[in-house]
Amino acid sequence: MLFFHDDRHRLHFPQAELDGGQFVTPYERPSRVEYVLRRLQETGMRAAAPGALDMGPVRAVHAPDYLEFLATCWADWVASGARGEIIATSFPVRRMRQKPPRNIDGKVGYYSLAAETAITAGTWEAAQASCALAQSAQRAVAAGERAAFALCRPPGHHAASDLFGGYCFLNNAAVAAQMFRDDGAGRVAVLDIDFHHGNGTQDIFHRRGDVFFASIHGAPEDAFPYFLGYADETGEGAGEGANLNLPLPPGTPFGPWAEALDAALAAIRDFGAEALVVSLGTDAFKDDPISFFKLESADFAEAGRRIAGAGLPTVFVMEGGYAIEAVGINAVNVLQGFEE
Ligand code: SP5
Ligand code: ZN
């Protein structure tokens, strides 16, 4: 399988993540990519050079003021006299005004959905390079490849039209799905197998009937992002029926997880999708440090086989996965299973 990679992911490496009341080294760290890259090379996957970022499809799924914020927040933060990394501390919660303030500290809270995700000097450049990989993989598939893999970092599925957080800034999978639409596919599906609910992708397409979103994830009662991902979220307006959430409880092993996968694939088939984008997180793995499903490494290959059964042109976009040494094996197992 063709894959796309860009070293500029290293420009995004915050020192701190707020976890359990402490600042820890972020779970979402540069070495994740190195493990996946090594495994891709070991298994003979074909590296291809990524193209430049096209802002057109990015603007189609993200709000203009949010993109302006991402481009300027670091300079504004530094100019305000702040000495550390950007971390959100104040949020427009219940009964507060949903209006971006002038003050940069307030703006950071306005555009964020969680405080664990820090922004640094290189974050915006890394996020753009990451998104360009999803675009390159989509272009390869649109040009006739059966499938391609974008080794995106930072990941994207928590990023909504105007929100960052959950380690995500630009929604790489949503951008790839949008590009399939722009290329003429009438209906596109996004299948999210990251352990966490893809709240950003769901939100972006919630009122649209042209992009189906299916997600298998830790139930929101028990798992981040906590405030979206219930089974009764089925889409709204033109998007009614084009959203399928399959939340699962702590300790879920491959059996019930695979049943959910089959249900998601059946729904995607019924929807009539002509192209598929897979949000490929490997944090459903049994040893993931922040997740609670129990998949074994071999199960990821079986997941890949079942996804291939959909028979669709497929773009794989890297999302989460924090059992660092196993992330490469598990991610590439999905790709290898798909190719069998
Ligand atoms: C892309 C992706 O997988 N994002 C995940 C973001 C999760 N962020 C917050 C998780 C909080 C979990 N706390 C677990 C405590 C373990 N010490
Ligand atoms: Zn995740």
Image (tube, rainbow, N blue to C red):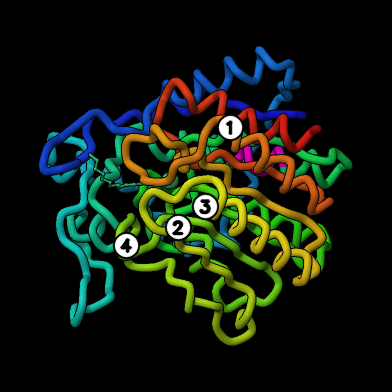
Q: Which of marks 4 and 3 precedes in the sequence?
A: 3
Can residue 270 be seen here? The reply is yes
What residue is shown at x 66% (from left), y 34% (from top)?
301
Residues under labels 3 and 4: Cα distance?
Answer: 19 Å
Disc 1 residue type?
Ala
Q: Which of marks 1 and 4 precedes in the sequence?
A: 4
**Element marked by disc 3:** loop
- In the picture, the disc for residue 331 is 1
In the rendered image, residue 102, in percent from the top left (x then y), is placed at 22, 63
User: In this rendering, which labeled residue sits more in front, label 1 or label 3?
Assistant: 1
Residues under labels 4 and 1: Cα distance?
Answer: 25 Å
The answer to whether 178 appears left or right of 139 in the picture is: left
Residue underneath mark 4 = 226
Q: Which of marks 1 and 2 precedes in the sequence?
A: 2
Q: Main secondary structure of the magenta part?
A: helix
Q: How many marks?
A: 4
The answer to whether 301 appears left or right of 221 in the picture is: right
Magenta residues (range)? 132-137
- In the picture, the disc for residue 197 is 2
Residue underneath mark 3 = 171
Disc 4 residue type?
Tyr
The answer to whether 56 appears left or right of 254 in the picture is: right
Disc 3 residue type?
Asn
